[in-house]
Amino acid sequence: MSLLDTFLSKVVRRGTLTVTDHKGNVSKVGTSAEGFPDIAVRLADAKVARDVVLKPELGGGEAYMDHRLIVENDDIMGLLSLLRLNSRWEEGGGFDDARWFDRAFGRLRGKLDRWNWNAKSKRNVAHHYDLDDRLYDLFLDENRQYSCGYWTSPDVGLDQAQRDKMAHIAAKLALAPGMRVLDIGCGWGGMAFYLHDKYDCDVTGITLSEEQLKYARADAERRGVADRVKFELVDYRDVTGSFDRIVSVGMFEHVGPPHYRAFFAKCRALLADDGVMLLHTIGRMGWPGTTDAWASKYIFPGGYAPALSEITDGSERSNLIQTDCETWRLHYAWTLRAWYARIMARRAEIESVYDARFFRMWQFYLAGCTSAFEHGVLCVYQLQYAKDRRVLPVTREYLAMEEARLNAAFH
């Protein structure tokens, strides 16, 4: 039995993985089981096996990008699901069998990578969000929401899930006409436009992405709201002024644990005395961890999904009251599957914008994230904060009532 076979036999016990090496030798691990896929892969050269054994996530991901690890039927989603299913978080799993010093180095690398000072934060954002603008139009929804949708059922569709997400967040902000709202990490402006449209608020969106800024400002001009919905290229640490509400969706993953206390302290300083804040972030169930090496290198340099304890440790020092906490367990998996289906349908167009290697990288990214939300450690946290305990209603009924009002026009 080869070293790769030994490694895979520990990882795949239910479902099967058939491997054909570069010489044509075939091996098979696992046992067919209901609910577990049967996957077949081919290795284009001898180096693939070594890369996968020594550094499963980085080595395997790079081999797939380079078309050296070839998954039959182009089923990378199936392969990554098979691996995660055999090591579900609920069962105490984690399929990183790298040697102890590789894991220790990974923790050290992760800690260093999360020091996101101002200039580094801008470089990290540009790495992912300043890609060719056409890419995001090919797989995002009508409002360019590049974050988790709110799925009232798995079959409502991506556009509706994203509208429902914005309504869910708006309800938690408890808005009133004329309020001043700060959107930290505003993306292409979809949330800012929604809040202004539904509540007649003045919204300031901030981003570190020059491409997002250009798109959002042009959209504000096109909509005729540039005097009320404004966008700035500025780090959250450099924002000044006072705001009635703060919303941040999908940005906290780029802050880094060393900066959490400073982030919340800044938010408190920016909030009016009767202010409310809504933080929406990818998180991890259980204890703190690390970002895998492949994602750090190719997708989100400096990115990290925090444990709830890490968020709480950062926020409790700021004297903000955590007034509501919600954990979304499957919503992002359904969002990612919708994005994945869209890129698979638009493969030729994406490859014409970039190339086949980039497409396989994006495919691996979305498939890997899907499996992590379906079977691994990842989830989404929505945390509501207030400076004064009397500002918000004392029961949650107001949320459902406001969402129903907002969604009445769409359903």
Image: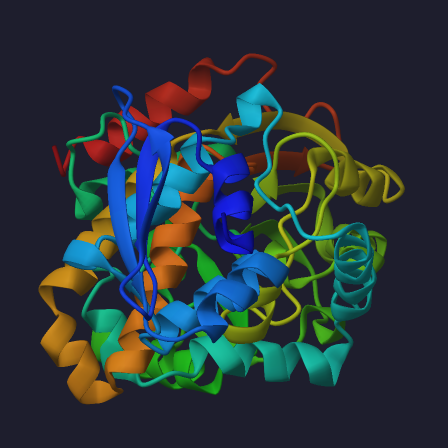
In this rendering, position of residue 215 left or right of residue 393: left
Q: Colour scheme of this structure image?
A: rainbow
User: Residue 219, position in %: x, y?
Assistant: 28, 77
Q: Quadrant of the C terminus?
A: top left
Q: Name the image quarter holding residue 25.
A: bottom left
Residue 224 appears in the picture as rendered: no
Q: Nearer the viewer, residue 131 or 271?
A: 131
Residue 53 appears in the picture as rendered: yes
Q: Residue furthest right?
A: 317
User: Residue 30, position in %: x, y?
Assistant: 38, 32
- How many numbered tags mark residues here? 0
User: Residue 386, position in %: x, y?
Assistant: 69, 35
Is residue 393 positioned above or below 154 on the image? above
Residue that appears at 48% across and 44% down: 8
User: Residue 278, position in %: x, y?
Assistant: 57, 42
Residue that appears at 42% across and 31% down: 85
In this rendering, position of residue 215 left or right of residue 101: left
Q: Name the image quarter holding residue 275.
A: top right
Q: Name the image quarter holding residue 389.
A: top right
Residue that appears at 50% across and 28% down: 88
Q: Nearer the viewer, residue 300 or 50?
A: 50
Residue that appears at 56% across and 36% down: 377
